[in-house]
Image (cartoon, rainbow, N blue to C red):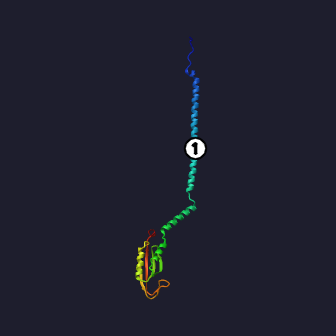
């Protein structure tokens, strides 16, 4: 048997090589983890910067699309004005057509004037009183007119009246009517 009389080596000295290697391995592992996380963070920052640049380009493009060309803005304003005018204005052809078509056979329109936007004043010649009454009742039944008011009715015996180029009468009735129009939107 062998007896060792030398003192025992402390554990730090006995395992110093192993501890040194372990410390180096831990150091390298820690440094590699720090380096990898720094690289990943750097890549994320780069990606975020690229994404921010892309978003800025998209925002600039959208702003440019929403900005109106001055000519396009003028055209849009003009189209809006035309639409407003059309909705506020009246189509007069049905009104004039209704006033003329409702005339009885032996009658004539002498004059017709527009008073404001709400009424038409007519001067007419009728052969008989029944023709005048028939004309007034036809106008009152029309959906274009709100009412008819007889302003004046008189018999003319002195001057001959021509109801057409070939039809002359010596006695007729002159009438002045005021025809009230319905508002343009409800007449359509």
Q: Residue at x 58, y 29 (%)?
A: 25
- Along the horizontal axis of the image, is 36 left or right of 93? right
92 relative to 6, above or below: below
Q: Residue at x 56, y 47 (%)?
A: 52
Q: Nearer the viewer, residue 70 or 82?
A: 82
* Tag 1 residue: 47
87 relative to 122, above or below: above
Q: Position of residue 32 (x, y in %)?
A: 58, 34
- Secondary structure beneath label 1: helix
Point out the residue furthest to the bottom here. 158
Q: Quadrant of residue 142?
A: bottom left
83 relative to 164, above or below: above
Quadrant holding the N terminus:
top right
Q: Position of residue 92 (x, y in %)?
A: 48, 72
- Along the horizontal axis of the image, is 34 left or right of 123? right
Q: Quadrant of residue 45?
A: top right
Q: Position of residue 17 (x, y in %)?
A: 59, 23
Q: Nearer the viewer, residue 28 or 88?
A: 88
164 relative to 23, above or below: below
């Amino acid at each position: 048997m062998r007896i060792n009389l030398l003192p025992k080596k402390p554990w730090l000295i006995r395992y110093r090589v192993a501890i040194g290697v372990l410390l180096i391995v831990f150091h390298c592992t820690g440094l590699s983890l720090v380096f990898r996380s720094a690289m990943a963070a750097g890549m994320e920052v780069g990606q975020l910067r690229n994404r921010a640049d892309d978003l800025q380009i998209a925002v600039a493009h959208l702003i440019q699309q929403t900005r109106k060309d001055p000519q396009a803005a003028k055209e849009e304003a003009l189209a809006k004005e035309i639409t407003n005018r059309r909705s506020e204005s009246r189509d007069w052809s049905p009104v004039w057509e209704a006033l003329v078509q409702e005339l009885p056979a032996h009658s004539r329109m002498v004059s017709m004037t527009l008073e404001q936007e709400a009424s038409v004043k007519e001067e007419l010649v009728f052969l008989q009183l029944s023709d005048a009454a028939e004309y007034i009742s036809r106008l009152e039944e029309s959906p274009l007119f709100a009412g008819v008011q007889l302003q004046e009715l008189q018999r003319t015996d002195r001057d001959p009246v021509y109801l057409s180029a070939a039809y002359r009468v010596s006695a007729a009735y002159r009438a002045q009517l005021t025809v009230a129009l319905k508002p343009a939107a409800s007449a359509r």
